[in-house]
Image (cartoon, rainbow, N blue to C red):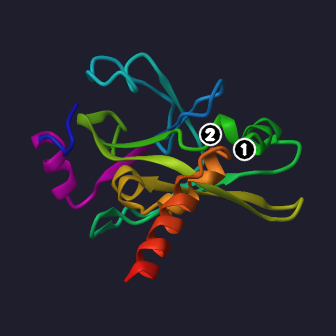
Amino acid sequence: MLDRPDSAAQAALAADVRKPITLCWLDILGEPMRVTNAPYSLTIVGSGDEDLDGFTFQAIDPRFVQVGTVKAAEGGTDTLSLRLSGLAGVDDELMTDIGDRARWLGRDCRLWRAMLDPQDFGRIGAIWTYYTGYMAVPRITGDRQSQTINLEVESYLSFFGQASGRTYLDQQNFDPQDRSAELAIAIANQANRRK
């Protein structure tokens, strides 16, 4: 799987008229979402990527699903925002999935790009991956007329770089029988009294 456009896709990107498309996979447990902003649904074969090959990415109107800009930052990429339609009666399945944190929290989100010929919409060159992260925080905004789900996606580097904020003094929160922090403080206080 490529992590950048191949020569054919680079030539298409350099052209005056170009048609880049995005493919998105949200690994929602039991109901994975595979969508694209291409003008037609795509079934991918022969890419060598197990998350792409053999799967169909449904064509979705970009007014209903939007992928934010991936911005590189120190320590990884900034938080990526995805906007999904969350209308009552239309998107009830997705709203139910988002309501159950165990089905999406910390699970994969992957994005790929490809180039289409602007004349006949045939694919030019290979598909390349440009973002991998994990789903973190959804926010539902709007009303019954126009409701959206704004889903934040964190990069893996930001996940590994976050400080937990925990100390050994928190150990009793995880194991009520563990008195090591209390004893360590008592020993330190006794040592100070002897001086």
Q: Is residue 22 magenta?
A: yes
Q: Quadrant of residue 158?
A: bottom left
Q: Residue at x 73, y 58 (%)?
A: 148
Mark 1: amino acid:
Ile
Q: Quadrant of residue 75?
A: bottom left
75, above or below 66, in the image: below
Q: Using the image as rendered, state which of residue 74 and residue 52 is in the foreground.
A: 74
Q: Which residue is mark 2?
A: 104
Can residue 42 be seen in the rendering of this structure? yes
Horizontal relation, residue 48 to residue 23: left or right: left
Residue 98, labelled with which disc? 1
Q: Using the image as rendered, state which of residue 54 and residue 26 is in the foreground.
A: 26
Mark 2: amino acid:
Trp
Horizontal relation, residue 169 to residue 162: left or right: right
Q: Residue at x 50, y 24 (%)?
A: 56
The magenta segment is 7-23
Residue 165 point in image, percent of width and height = 49, 65
Residue 125, labelled with which disc? none
98, above or below 58, in the image: below
Quarter placement of the N terminus:
top left
Residue 57 point in image, percent of width and height = 50, 30
Residue 91 point in image, percent of width and height = 78, 42
Q: Residue at x 81, y 51 (%)?
A: 87
Q: How many marks?
A: 2
